[in-house]
Amino acid sequence: MNEIIRLLDSVARDRNIDRELLVQDLELAMVSAARKHFNSELDDEFGCEIDRLGGSISLWRNTDEGTREVIPLEKLGRIPAQTAKQVMIQRFRENERVSLLEEFSKRQGELVTGVAQRYEGNALIVQLERAEGFMPKSEQIPGEQFQAGDRVRCILLDVRDAGSQVKIVMSRAHPDFIRRLFESEVPEVAERTIEIKAMSREPGFRTKLAVSSVDSKVDAVGACVGVRGSRIRNIVDELGGEKIDIVRWNESSQVLISNALKPAEVEEVSLCFELGRATIIVREDQLSLAIGRRGQNVRLAARLTGWDVDILTPPEFEKGLQTLQAAVKSVEGATDEMLDRMGALGMISVFDVEEIGEASLVAECGMTDELATQVVDACSDRAKIVAEEMQRDRTAAELLQAQEGAVVDALLGGGPAIPAAATDQQSESAADNILGLGPTNS
């Protein structure tokens, strides 16, 4: 009978199940077998006890007289033995499911390493120690593919009880995956000497982190980058070349937004707390850098800082201020001091005043209710005119772009011919400008 104890110990060790639970399951299985053999439906008619040290099994039947009738195991036969086997397997699987659920629930959010097994649909199946996890398409890095046997590092995103099994959801696209990678590569982050204050990510493309140090002797950005970029390089390699911008955290929103928009150089930051919007002024040569490819840089900076970010060049900024000034000054009773207070509140255009409304003008700018209403009405009227002008400019620019494209196609023989009755002189001038020939002297 010691063989039974050895088997139970082996199962308990391999499947990380409490040995006592396995013993109790075996006792229940033997009771089920006895009930099957005697065609009994009474729950308390039979009993079983297994010696925890020697492994001997005692099976009995409770009689009406209150005594126990010992049942030899050999008497049960094959069919009850098969019943006992099925009950044991079912109970063992249930115990293993509960064990997996408890173990991986405690590890939720941890960085783990597994082995890629296969793809089921778009989901990647990964072997994790004694369980399988799956990574949905939404949690994978776009464009990343694994082969069977490849090492996969990810985080345990979620653990779900799905009835007969445990579903372990993993992720490489979640922002916390970046956080765990920094904790594994940068000891100062793991020790909380350096804190990751904020993070924004577009998986597979770019990530921005704002970091700060609780120790003035430790440079947060330098520690995360490492000597000659060794630490950040390991993380970038793990992410398949995803760009990572590490910026210095600052409690001042203006400084933080300037840092978040790097590598672009910011001239000025104007905050409007009423709208939760930051207006950034950058030079013309920094505009495309601040916006980033397909707006990625400004989009990630907005998520990192929690502000809506608008980027303007100095001429655009000045034009908006002049339009606002003209609209406000057209109202009798409005003063320069009121205009200055509006600017301090981040109102830099007639659209801002229209959106914010009278309440803030009365509370913050010292206007009366009547004056505030007149100022908002004046700005609203001017906003409609500006919107129409912007629409006309946009339409004209689109038309010019279409005409220039048609001219180029015609010159290269790659498009429909332009009718001779059309603007021949304009087409010739546009072609000269495109080809850099300048005006033709007759």
Image (cartoon, rainbow, N blue to C red):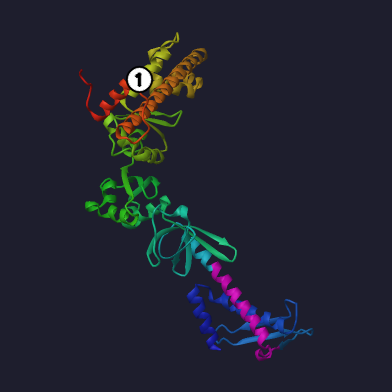
Is 83 on the left or on the right of 150, as rendered? Answer: right
Residue extending farthest to the right is 64
Residue receiving disc 1: 319
Residue 161 locus on image (x, y percent): 56, 61
Which stretch appears magenta? Answer: 70-98
- Dividing the image into 4 quarters, which one contains the N terminus? bottom right
SS class, disc 1:
helix
Please give the name of the residue rendered at 56% of the width and 65% of the height, measured from the top-left corner: 165
Residue at 51% over, 21% down: 359
Disc 1 residue type? Lys
Say left or right for 324 vs 52.
left
* Residue lying at the far top of the rendered structure: 332
- Above or below residue 432? Residue 190 is below
Tell me if residue 256 comes above or below residue 183 in the rendering: above
Give the percent coordinates (x, y) of residue 227. 22, 53
Q: Is residue 347 left or right of residue 221?
A: right
Q: Residue furthest left?
A: 441
Residue at 32 percent of width and 24 percent of height: 427
Viewer can see residue 186: no
Residue 16 lies, with reference to residue 333, above or below; the image says: below
In depth, the one of 146 and 210 nearer the eye is 146
Dominant SS type (magenta): helix
Q: Is residue 320 left or right of residue 435?
A: right
Return the x and y of residue 282 as percentages of the image width and height.
30, 30
Residue drawn at x 66%, y 80% as measured from the top left: 83
Q: Is residue 245 visible?
A: yes
